[in-house]
Image (spheres, rainbow, N blue to C red):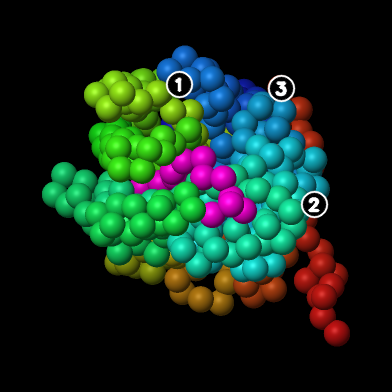
Amino acid sequence: MIHDNYGINEKGHLTVCGADTVSLADKYGTPLYILDEDLVRAKCREYKAAFEKYFPSGSRPFFASKALSYVGIYRIIADEGLGTDIVSPGELYTAIKAGFPTDNTCFHGNNKTDDDIEYGIRSGVGYFVVDCKEELYAVNDTAKRLGKVQKILLRLTPGIDPHTFAAVNTGRIDSKFGSSIDTGAAEEITKTALSLDGIKLCGYHCHIGSQIFESEPFCRAAGIMTQFSALIKKKYGYEAEIINLGGGFGVRYYDGQNEPDTDAFIKEISDTIRGVCEKNGMKFPVVFMEPGRSIVGAAGVTVYTVGSIKTIPGFRTYVSVDGGMPDNPRYALYASRYTAVIANKASEPCVDEYTIAGRCCESGDLIGEKMPLQRAERGDKLAVLVTGAYNYSMASNYNRIPKAPIVTVSGGIDKLTVKRESFEDLTHNEF
Ligand code: LLP
């Protein structure tokens, strides 16, 4: 199996965290999201341990909750002592509802509205990650009006495209996020931030991308950000306390992908920052990072029931399931590849490659193509692996399909943590 938390029991059924996925599907219905809480906690601890080992005190991982946002996940994250990255007032509201300590949050987004800013400041958000000058002034003015001084980080673009990294090192200057170091916008906004008294500039933030499997782009970003901090110190006498390097650690979705070794990556990043600090006579800053996918990705599995199976001779065989792009839009959006298993025949060999289709009225509604599978029949349970990140959080009600529930499993024991939407829920706000 592609991750250690997946197994096959004596009945030949797929298990997650020791729980039988077929029994869970029978108990809760399909489609069903299953989340291995023990793995989520283990991942949190893995990051925390590496941070404690290689970064100065106060450094910590923030869970990027855009990967998975519901009340229960914030409780797990708070329990593990991580911060959380929120990107909208809706995520903030959910975190608050879970009792998450708001002073341990970073509020992101390239276009926070005035209402978002006021809600964030009133709620006691730890750090606003300020995207641009307009937002800087808006945060400053709102904080002053509320009689507060808001801590901020400035979102900068270090000019790295991790996916074409070797050839291009300025590929992301045109990103919609942040202020570019290369164009001088970053220095400009820093100078302005230092002149305002409704905010306290605590440092800098960057995020270079997602699904990154090499340490080199992270180290490169860490070097550029620390170097920028050195430049600002030299020119303006301000030394950043915090550098936040965003998320992006890759996750294995199929055989052949080599996941980053968290400890080794964090050590390399730490060595890079230390090198630049020593050269420039600076203190090693507090480091934040924001892993999302790598904390919840492998913990998630989606189970469906197989419906129709259609062979078009000479072309392909469709295996249709009772979910699809409403619960997992990632193939439709990005052609993202997954691994699937017939959960009730997990110990049988794969017999062919299939196209897994969803139930929506749209030919692009696919979960994947050329997917090796055991012989599929109507009524089988089909499990798609590694769906913990960016599935539930990106789910929709397209074709008026109610959202699937989430069942968490810990120590082999299952618990319903998000209820399946009802038809009534679908029309709840409609007159
Ligand atoms: N921090 C910031 C500022 C981000 O923008 C992101 C992701 C993260 C952290 C977390 O990155 P991660 O560790 O999860 O790679 N919907 C897409 C992914 C979009 C990611 C956007 N930002 C997908 O399904 O692949």
Q: Residue at x 77, y 47 (%)?
A: 96
Question: Which residue has dot 3 on it?
Answer: 411
Q: Residue at x 27, y 27 (%)?
A: 280
Is 418 or 48 nearer to us in this picture? 48
Q: Amino acid at mark 3?
A: Gly
237 vs 112, left or right, is left
Is 240 or 218 nearer to us in this picture? 240
- Establish if 331 lies above or below 374: below
Q: CA distance from mark 1 to mark 2?
A: 40 Å
Question: Which residue has dot 2 on it?
Answer: 419
Q: Position of residue 56 (x, y in %)?
A: 48, 20
244 vs 67, left or right, is left
Q: CA distance from mark 1 to mark 3?
A: 32 Å
Question: Which residue has dot 1 on it?
Answer: 55
Q: Residue at x 30, y 37 (%)?
A: 234
Is 231 or 88 nearer to us in this picture? 231
Q: Which residues are magenta?
A: 196-211
Farthest residue toward the left?
167
Q: Position of residue 239 (x, y in %)?
A: 41, 35
- Establish if 323 lies above or below 413: below
